[in-house]
Image (cartoon, grey):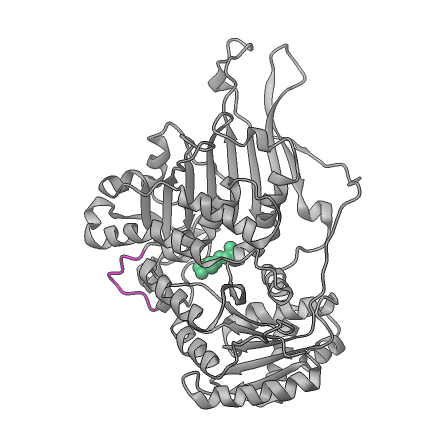
């Protein structure tokens, strides 16, 4: 295959860049992994790009006792590791906006102290009383934090909405339909929906956002984005990493909860939804929810023909030997937790009737790659005898989500030489080559949107509930009738268990090798 380099003369362009207004960011779980791996580096990146208002501060809140100074040192250490090339004074300047409060999340006293600190800091940094509370804690602590914030009056916005209070929560958002509905009831007791930001970091990825631009800012794709032209769609999210140090969470979750219910279904919704009337948070989310509601429930009496679950065994991942899932630290020796899922999803509406969407995601697979591949139908008739229509490779449009972000389209062309001499050629657009600089971090975009009050890239409660309604019966069936959809196994470094290949072979198709 040949690469066609894009012309570098992109014309015009429109970039709607907004800077955040004055705002306090309170991070619960500020001494933890998420805060230091993602949140602080992303806030710093916004600060460096001038996208944070000068009137901002970060109030870290966690159990570990620390003074403001110790927290600032920790923040600078994080930045040194994450942005080693950035001059020290910039890091120093940022850390001056960081303060800390320690306490027990279950203790009312913490929230009384927090209220007092916020009053002082709001006045010192002139943040106009705008508060963003980020819950970067384990999910079992969401409930006490939310209740306490509510009972201390910290979730109340001013009547005239001149200042805001927003709460950001991370997945896992519940572990099944019932628990997510309970969480929503709890949130809605003290917050209104416009104050709740449910993060799915996949939506912060540039290439995931580009799905909407690609589909709805170009006139030529939408007319062929239907069952008349599309044969099937594959969505792959493959990781080379194993469960790492997260067994205590992963043993309770498994891949269906960890990746499928959220990131995979979000991508599916973006690819398949109808065009919203405007790029407004509720219009976009309305269309996503409408689409998710049309997904056909998995037939529980025939589950193994629709969904395959697998667990990794030892093997070689990119030349490195890795152990069985069962030998990972913290994993039960008889664990039945799935580290891989492949599923065939059907959408019951006019646009997609009969078009299968094949979704797969797994840990310890051959390569780290996320992509959406849209395979178009074969030509209806071949004039290039002796080649039949099926021998002419179909067009495949691939939206490369990561790591090599971009778009490619495979087409058939005449190869110089004899009269009938055809070859497939990929027209590749590589974001890095075209736009040069490094793409913004997903959390950067999401945090900025939280401060700006734009909920487009965040889950709304009905969206979360509809995805849990789809996967909860599958989780229950795995528990109660495991023989109907047995756990399968795959060697690390493969593309999943053989049974996942059968899902497509059954339909006379095959997985693409990304
Ligand atoms: C997280 C999952 O949501 O996404 C992890 O909990 C997974 O298990 C991660 O590794 C993958 O994210 P990314 O951005 O590296 O593809």
Q: Is residue 275 magenta?
A: no
Place residue 116 in its image quadrant.
Answer: bottom right
Q: State the image coordinates of residue 354 (x, y, percent, origin top left).
A: 40, 30
Q: Nearer the viewer, residue 138 or 404?
A: 138
Q: State the image coordinates of residue 92 (x, y, percent, origin top left).
A: 71, 80
Q: Compared with residue 143, is residue 334 higher up or lower down, i.e. above or below? A: above
Q: State the image coordinates of residue 473 (x, y, percent, origin top left).
A: 28, 51
Q: Compared with residue 24, is residue 271 higher up or lower down, i.e. above or below? A: above
Whether residue 425 is visible: yes
Q: Which residues lie in the magenta part?
A: 329-337
Residue at screen point 42% across, 78% down? 147
Kindly report the secondary structure that dominates the magenta region of the rendered protein. Answer: loop
Is the N terminus in the top left, top right, bottom left or bottom right quadrant?
Answer: top right
Horizontal arrangement in the rendering, residue 48 relative to residue 504 (left or right): right
Residue at screen point 41% across, 34% down? 356
Q: State the image coordinates of residue 74 (x, y, percent, origin top left).
A: 60, 81
């Amino acid at each position: 295959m040949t690469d066609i380099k894009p012309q570098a003369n992109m014309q015009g362009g429109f970039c709607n860049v907004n800077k955040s207004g004055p705002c306090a960011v309170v991070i619960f779980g500020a001494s933890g992994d998420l805060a230091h791996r993602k949140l602080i580096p992303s806030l710093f990146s916004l600060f460096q790009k001038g996208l944070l208002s000068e009137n901002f501060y970060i109030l870290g809140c966690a159990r570990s006792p620390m003074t403001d100074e110790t927290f600032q040192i920790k923040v600078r250490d994080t930045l040194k590791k994450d942005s080693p090339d950035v001059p020290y004074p910039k890091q120093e300047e940022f850390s001056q906006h960081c303060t800390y409060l320690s306490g027990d999340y279950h203790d009312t006293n913490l929230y009384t102290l927090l209220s007092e600190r916020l009053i002082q800091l709001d006045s010192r940094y002139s943040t106009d009383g705008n508060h963003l509370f980020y819950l970067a804690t384990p999910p079992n602590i969401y409930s006490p934090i939310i209740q306490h914030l509510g009972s201390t009056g910290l979730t109340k916005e001013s009547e005239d909405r001149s200042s805001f209070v927003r709460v950001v929560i991370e997945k896992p958002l519940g572990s099944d339909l019932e628990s997510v509905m309970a969480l929503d009831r709890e949130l809605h007791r003290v917050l209104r929906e416009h104050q709740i930001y449910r993060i799915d970091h996949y939506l912060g990825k540039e290439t995931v956002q580009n799905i909407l631009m690609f589909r709805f800012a170009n006139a030529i794709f939408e007319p062929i984005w239907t069952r008349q032209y599309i044969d099937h769609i594959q969505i792959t999210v493959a990781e080379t990493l194993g469960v790492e140090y997260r067994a205590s969470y992963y043993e309770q979750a498994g891949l269906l909860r960890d990746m499928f219910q959220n990131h995979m279904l979000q991508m599916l919704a973006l690819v398949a939804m109808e065009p919203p009337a405007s790029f407004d948070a509720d219009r976009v989310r309305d269309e996503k929810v409408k689409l998710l509601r049309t997904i056909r429930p998995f037939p529980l009496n025939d589950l193994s023909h629709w969904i395959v679950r697998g667990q990794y065994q030892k093997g070689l991942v990119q030349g490195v030997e890795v152990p069985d899932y069962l030998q990972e630290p913290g994993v039960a020796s008889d664990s039945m937790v799935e580290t891989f899922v492949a599923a065939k999803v059907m959408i019951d509406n006019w646009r997609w009737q009969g078009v299968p969407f094949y979704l797969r995601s797994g840990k310890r697979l051959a390569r780290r790659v996320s992509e959406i591949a849209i395979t178009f139908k074969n030509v209806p008739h071949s004039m290039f005898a002796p080649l039949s229509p099926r021998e002419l490779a179909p067009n495949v449009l691939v939206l490369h989500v990561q790591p090599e972000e971009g778009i490619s389209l495979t087409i058939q062309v005449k190869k110089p030489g004899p009269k009938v001499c055809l070859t497939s050629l990929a027209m590749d657009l590589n974001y890095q080559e075209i736009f040069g600089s490094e793409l913004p971090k997903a959390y950067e975009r999401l945090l900025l949107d939280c401060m700006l009050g734009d909920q487009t890239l965040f889950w709304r409660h009905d969206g979360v509930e509809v995805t849990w309604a789809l996967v909860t019966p599958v989780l229950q069936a795995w528990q109660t009738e495991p023989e109907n959809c047995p756990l399968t196994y795959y060697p690390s470094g493969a593309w999943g268990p053989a049974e996942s290949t059968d899902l497509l072979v059954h339909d006379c198709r095959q997985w693409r090798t990304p």
